[in-house]
Amino acid sequence: MLHIVAGCGNIEFVDELRKQLTDKVNKLVDEVVNITLREGNRMAMARMREARAKYKGREGMIPFAEHPNYPKEKEALEFMIQQRKKGISFRLIAEGMERHGFMTRYQKENWNPGTVLRILKRQGIA
């Protein structure tokens, strides 16, 4: 609500009115900005929760050597297991995979030692 000072001249009245209106507009703008930020954060958090739930409940990630479209993975897994049982490091196993021509699921020739580690961990061998 605007408070008008009684007995002021026209210039003082307009200045006071302008000041009161400016204060009210600034408060409203601040409120709108805060509401917008809160709503944006709420929506972003909802999108993150949805993505996290989708990721956790994802299907289609078929374990290594069990995918029907990649029959050579079984051979590759057997190679990894044999090498690891001999005490060979993950780096050397990855290099051996490359030397023997085993391709990754994504048809790449380069094997990462971390990938070998994860595959063997899932098999309970790392």
Image (cartoon, helix red, strand yellow):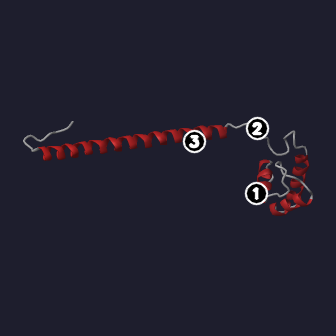
Q: Residue at x 51, y 38 (%)?
A: 43
Disc 3 marks a residue whose amino acid type is Met
Secondary element at image label 1: helix
| Quadrant of the image occupied by residue 31 | top left
According to the picture, the residue beneath numbered tag 3 turns out to be 48
Asked whether 68 or 12 is in front, the reply is: 12
Asked whether 35 or 52 is in front, the reply is: 35
Secondary element at image label 2: loop
Closer to the camera: disc 1 or disc 2? 2
- Callout 2 crowding tier (Cα within 10 Å): few <14, some 14–19, many ≥20: few
Apparent side of residue 4 relative to residue 65 in the rendered image (left or right): left
Secondary element at image label 3: helix
Pointers 2 and 3 in contact (C-beta within 8 Å): no
According to the picture, the residue beneath numbered tag 1 turns out to be 114
| Rendering coords of residue 112 (x, y %) | 79, 58
Q: In the image as oriented, which residue stretches furthest toward the front?
A: 10
| Rendering coords of residue 117 (x, y %) | 78, 55
Closer to the camera: disc 1 or disc 3? 3
Q: Residue at x 90, y 43 (%)?
A: 71
CA–CA distance in space, label 2 to label 3: 21 Å
Q: In this view, does 86 lie above or below 48?
A: below
Pointers 1 and 2 in contact (C-beta within 8 Å): no
According to the picture, the residue beneath numbered tag 2 turns out to be 60
Asked whether 27 or 66 is in front, the reply is: 27
Mark 3 or mark 1, which is nearer the start of the sequence? 3
